[in-house]
Image (cartoon, rainbow, N blue to C red):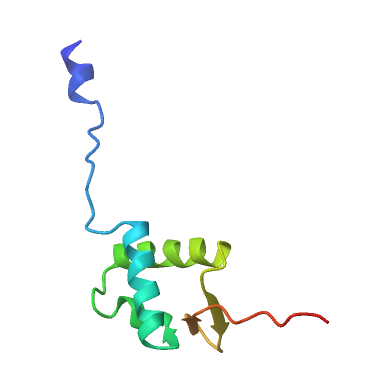
Amino acid sequence: MPKKRKNRPVHQVIQYPYTIEGQKEYILNEITVKPRVAFTELFEKVPTRISLIFNFLAILEMLANGLLSIQVGEGFNNFWVMRPEAVPSVN
């Protein structure tokens, strides 16, 4: 029996210094200061893979909730996030 305990996988939980809510606030602040922010600009201050993931998840959630819009350019990772544009009313 002791051998089974030795071979059990060990899972380590890492607490990252990011949250989806925190990144949403950060992104909203950025698009308040500038009307349009490049996706790559959002993680230049903390260029880690995990910060990229949290920013991307925050952007997806904000898009789903109508809190921002994106403009897609040509090429890889070439898009901008911005405040949602006013929807013209139909008369």
Instruction: Choose between 83 and 40: the one closer to the eye.
Output: 83
Residue 27 on image: x %, y %: 38, 73
Q: Is residue 60 left or right of residue 51?
A: right
The answer to whether residue 35 is above or below residue 66 is below
Q: Residue furthest top?
A: 1
Please say if 62 is above or below 74.
above
Which residue is painted at 52% across and 73% down in the image? 68
The residue drawn where x is 28% and y is 80% is 44
Quadrant including the C terminus = bottom right
Percent from the top left, x then y, of residue 38? 42, 85
Residue 47 vertical position relative to residue 33 in the rendered view, above or below: above
Residue 30 visible from this viewpoint: yes
Considering every residue shown, the one lying at the far front of the view is: 91
Can residue 40 be seen?
Answer: no
Q: Is residue 4 left or right of residue 66?
A: left
Closest to the observer: 32 or 9?
A: 32
Q: Which of the 4 quarters of the picture holds residue 23?
A: bottom left
Tell whether 65 sits left or right of 47: right
Residue 59 image point, x, y percent: 46, 68
In the image, 23 versus 39, the foreground residue is 23
Q: Residue at x 23, y 42 (%)?
A: 13
- Residue 52, image quadrant: bottom left
Instruction: Quarter of the image for the N terminus: give it.
Output: top left
Which residue occupies 56% across, 84% down? 71
Count of marks overlaid on the render: 0
